[in-house]
Amino acid sequence: MKDDDLIRYSRHILLPEIDYSGQKKITASHVLIIGAGGLGSPAAIYLAASGVGKITICDFDSVDLSNLQRQILHQDNSVGTNKAFSAKKTLKKVNPHIEIISVKNKLNIDEVKKLAKDVDVILDCSDNFKTRYSLNKIAFDLKKPLVSGAAIQFDGQLSVYDFRNHETPCYQCLFPDSSSQEEVRCSDHGVLSPVVGVIGSMQAVETLKLLLNIGSSNVGKLVIYDAKNMHWSEMKFRKDPKCEVCA
Ligand SMILES: [Zn+2]
């Protein structure tokens, strides 16, 4: 590690749980972020600033003026441009010493699988159930850890699925019936800007913990944040023996 990097990452290196060797591990890591919106923005910015050596960020959508209230990767002059491309520009300013790969095409399952094959952690920062179920299956098939976040109105959720451990339950165990779930989108129902910041930042925290193998992870737990009442709760769940994906 160069002298500048020792200074840049000194507050990490000072933590005995990370130290010099942990920071080197972060630098050698590759994460895949699906979605460069409200959750993907804080997650990507913190992971880039933390020194994750390679970040692949995917989003086929373009930046809309209504995104700027919460999607802090994008600024006024990014309106109309692709979100993954805009994300790369911002992340390069945050940390010019890491590699950022932006993917702006709409991907099918095989293409995501190909991208995810060599990564250390997958972050689900998407905004729809179809992508969540697909990423769960892909992460399970590849035995990769998946950090999943969601936020709407004043509420947020976070869960971690560490498929390196075959005991871990999956997203499908937690929500077995996709048809019963109503798609609730920020574009229709609104969202308080920093709620996505809280959940996306927590996704970055859990990702670094998985990369470094420190602390206890959130596996088998759904953390629920009620911002209106400043209330956190936790729901434990188990592997479903009849799960279509992981049983
Ligand atoms: Zn399952």
Image (cartoon, rainbow, N blue to C red):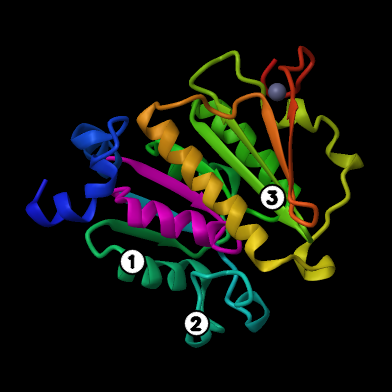
Residue 182, image x, y percentages: 88, 50
Q: Which residue of the protein is positioned furthest toward the right in this rendering?
A: 180
Crowd class of label 1 (few under 14; some 14 to 19; many from 20; radius 10 Å): some
In this picture, is 179 found above or below 173?
A: below
Quadrant of residue 186 within the rendered picture: bottom right
Report which quarter residue 211 is drawn in. top left
Query: Is the CB atom of the residue marked by disc 2 within 8 angstroms of ligand 1's nearest atom?
Result: no
Query: Which residue lies under the disc numbered 1?
Result: 94
* Badge 2 density bin: few <14, some 14–19, many ≥20, Cα 10 Å: some
Between 240 and 69, the one nearer to me in the picture: 69
> Helix, strand or loop at disc 2?
helix
Frontmost of labels 1 and 2 is: 1
Query: Which numbered disc flags the more N-terminal residue, 2 or 3?
Result: 2
Q: Nearest the camera: 20 or 81?
A: 20
Q: Residue at x 56, y 14 (%)?
A: 166
Across and down, in percent, residue 3 comes to 8, 53
Magenta part of the protein: which range? 28-53
The tag earlier along the polypeptide, 1 or 2, is 2
Residue 9 shown left or right of residue 41 in the figure = left
Q: Amino acid at mark 2?
A: Ser
Q: Which mark is residue 150?
A: 3
Q: Work out which quarter of the rendered image holds the N terminus and state it.
A: top left
**How far is mark 1 from mark 2, CA to CA?**
16 Å
> Would you say the residues marked 2 and 3 are in contact, meaning their CB atoms lie under 8 Å apart?
no
Nearest to the observer: residue 213 or residue 242:
213
Mark 2, residue position: 78
